[in-house]
């Protein structure tokens, strides 16, 4: 987020706000996975959904390289959560 701010993406940007929420949710998901929680699949699903929303919002607002990078990073995050969501 610091990199995006330095590149000119405003902190009140919708995609930026969603990214902050996504980071907080990812922290929760890591803790759930470390504890082998039964809820880890649900938190991974939320991470996947929120990462996808960040990517979509950033892509739709894309007016500069920072927005494009945010969309790419968020999509990468969502893809990383996907195997956890669909694990057996």
Image: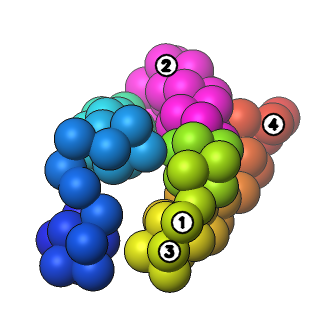
Numbered disc in front, either 3 or 2: 3
In the image, taking residue 12 as reference, residue 33 lies left or right, namely right
Q: Where is residue 88 in the image (x, y as percent from the top left)?
A: 82, 35
In the image, taking residue 54 as reference, residue 30 lies left or right, namely left
Q: Position of residue 39 (x, y in %)?
A: 49, 19
Residue bearing mark 1: 63
Instruction: Name the foreground residue: 23 vs 40.
Output: 23
What label does residue 86 carry, if any?
4
**Which stretch is magenta?**
34-53
As helix, strand or loop, the secondary structure at mark 2 comes to: loop
Residue bearing mark 2: 39
What label does residue 64 carry, if any?
3
Question: Extreme front residue here?
Answer: 63
Numbered disc in front, either 1 or 2: 1
Mark 2 or 4, nearer chain start: 2
Q: In this view, does 35 lie above or below 60?
A: above
How far apart are labels 1 and 2 at the CA level? 37 Å
How far apart are labels 3 and 1 at the CA level? 4 Å
Mark 3 or 4, nearer chain start: 3
How far apart are labels 2 and 4 at the CA level? 13 Å
Say few, some or many: other residues with alpha carbon within 10 Å of mark 3 (under 14 / 14 to 19 / 20 or more): few
Residue 80 in view (yes/no): no
């Amino acid at each position: 987020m610091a990199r995006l701010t330095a590149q000119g993406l405003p902190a009140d940007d919708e995609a930026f706000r969603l990214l902050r929420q996504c980071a907080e949710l990812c922290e929760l998901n890591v803790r759930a996975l470390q504890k082998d929680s039964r809820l880890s699949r649900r938190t991974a699903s939320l991470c996947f959904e929120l990462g996808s929303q960040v990517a979509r919002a950033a892509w739709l607002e894309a007016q500069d390289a920072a927005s494009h990078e945010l969309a790419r990073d968020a999509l990468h995050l969502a893809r990383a959560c996907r195997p956890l969501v669909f694990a057996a």
